[in-house]
């Protein structure tokens, strides 16, 4: 679990209102759930989805990026939590998050790849 007083630069400054700290932690936990869902979805695609006829690589081209992106979201979520905590401790504006835009872009790309795999499979 994340520590309310992270080591390093985020640990200095003044203690923010606990409500803001808890809100920041809830945001971190929400991104962590999203990361876990991406990893589980990727594992489900690779292990449980039946093979696409004529496209033996289809499950892996869809599932592996989901697993890798899930790991990336988990790491990025922690970084965002630290940056937000540091900003609150120093009375600065919260940094903008790239996570929603990145998540939307990756899901769009995965959906497009899925459509291609399904179409290629249907044509064979």
Image (spheres, rainbow, N blue to C red):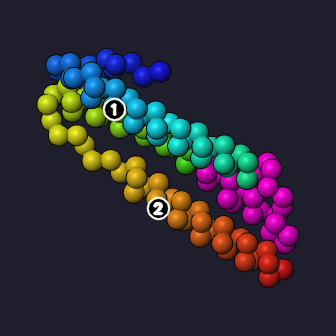
* Residue 39: mark in rendering: none
Residue 99 image offset from top left, x and y in percent? 40, 49
Question: Does residue 75 appear anywhere in the picture?
Answer: no
Residue 63 highlighted magenta (yes or no): yes
The residue labelled by disc 2 is: 105
SS type, badge 1: helix
The residue positioned 46% from the left and 40% from the top of the image is 31
Are there few (<14), some (14-19), or many (20+) residues within 10 Å of tag 1? some
The residue positioned 33% from the left and 32% from the top of the image is 24
Contact flag, marks 2 and 1 (Cβ < 8 Å):
no
The residue labelled by disc 1 is: 24
Question: Does residue 8 appear anywhere in the picture?
Answer: yes
The residue positioned 69% from the left and 60% from the top of the image is 61
Frontmost of labels 2 and 1 is 1
Pick the residue in front: 44 or 57: 44
Does the magenta stretch mainly form a helix, a strand or a loop? helix
Q: Is residue 100 above or below residue 8?
A: below
Residue 17 found in image quarter: top left
The residue positioned 51% from the left and 59% from the top of the image is 106
Quadrant in the picture for the C terminus: bottom right
Farthest-out residue, bottom: 123
Residue 27 image offset from top left, x and y in percent? 39, 36
Q: Which residues are magenta?
A: 46-68
Q: Earlier in the sequence, mark 2 or mark 1?
A: 1
Left or right of 67 on screen, residue 73: left
Are there few (<14), some (14-19), or many (20+) residues within 10 Å of tag 2? few
């Amino acid at each position: 679990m994340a520590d309310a007083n992270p080591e390093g630069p985020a640990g200095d400054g003044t203690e923010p209102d606990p409500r803001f700290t808890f809100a920041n932690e809830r945001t971190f936990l929400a991104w962590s759930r999203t990361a876990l869902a991406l990893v589980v979805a990727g594992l489900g695609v690779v292990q449980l989805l039946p093979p696409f006829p004529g496209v033996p690589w289809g499950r892996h081209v869809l599932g592996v990026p989901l697993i890798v992106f899930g790991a990336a979201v988990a790491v990025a979520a922690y970084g965002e939590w630290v940056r937000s905590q540091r900003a609150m401790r120093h009375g600065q504006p919260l940094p903008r998050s790239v996570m929603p835009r990145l998540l939307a872009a990756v899901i769009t790309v995965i959906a497009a790849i899925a459509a291609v795999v399904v179409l290629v499979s249907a044509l064979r």
